[in-house]
Amino acid sequence: MGRQRGGADAAASVDERTCASCGRRIEWRAKWARDWDAVRHCSDACRRRGVRAVDRQLEEEIRALLAQRAACATICPSEAARRIGGDDRWRELMEPARRAARRLVAAGEVEITQRGQVVDPSTAKGPIRIRRAPR
């Protein structure tokens, strides 16, 4: 059986896409060669998790918080998590808030920054800030 795509050139020629659940970049894998167009999630865990109602609420809250601020102002994902989860549940909503921010980056609505510099949301570790994407 012949190879449909080969080696390092294959990964470079495949269109970039992001996971529908976590918003991270999906890395092309040879085992997905036949059905690459149908791949929507980066892992089985993301496929199982999907995007829940609370995830959509966090996206909306991020948009609302940014709309209340100056165009160049930033917010912390914890602000959205606190508004949705209150004082009791906000910590457990921190990773979902970061996922929501990554999905908004993929949609071109926001940017994720660290120390004032835009960073790749797929690889950013540590504290992040969210700001509106320039128009």
Image: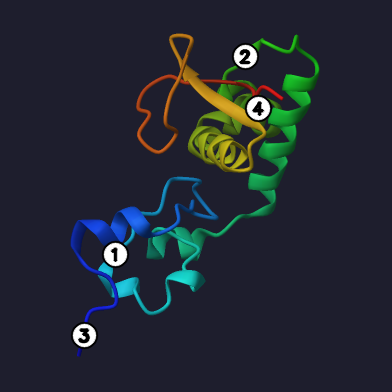
Q: Which residue is mark 3?
A: 2
User: Closer to us: mark 3 or mark 4?
Assistant: 3
Which of the marked residues, 4 or 1, is nearer the chain's N terminus?
Answer: 1
Q: Which residue is mark 1?
A: 29
Q: Is residue 116 above or below residue 22?
A: above
- How packed mark 4 is, by other alpha carbons closer than 10 Å (few <14, some 14-19, many 20 or more), is many
* Left/right of residue 44 with respect to residue 80 in the rendered view: left
Q: Do the CB atoms of the residues marked 4 and 1 lie less than 8 Å apart?
A: no
Q: Position of residue 109 (x, y in %)?
A: 67, 33
Which element is circle 3 on? loop
Which element is circle 2 on? strand
* Left/right of residue 4 with respect to residue 95 in the rendered view: left
Q: Do the CB atoms of the residues marked 3 and 2 lie less than 8 Å apart?
A: no
Q: Is residue 95 above or below residue 83?
A: below
Q: Which residue is mark 2?
A: 74
Residues 107 and 74: in front is 107
**How far is the residue under mark 3 from the one under mark 2?**
50 Å
**How far is the residue under mark 3 from the one under mark 1?**
16 Å
Q: Is residue 12 above or below residue 109?
A: below
Q: Position of residue 122 (x, y in %)?
A: 40, 38
Give the residue displayed 76% in from the left and 12% down from the top. 69
Residue type highlighted by circle 2: Thr
Residue type highlighted by circle 4: Ala
User: Closer to us: mark 1 or mark 2?
Assistant: 1
**How far is the residue under mark 1 from the one under mark 2?**
35 Å
- How packed mark 2 is, by other alpha carbons closer than 10 Å (few <14, some 14-19, many 20 or more), is many
Residue type highlighted by circle 3: Gly
Q: Which residue is mark 4?
A: 80
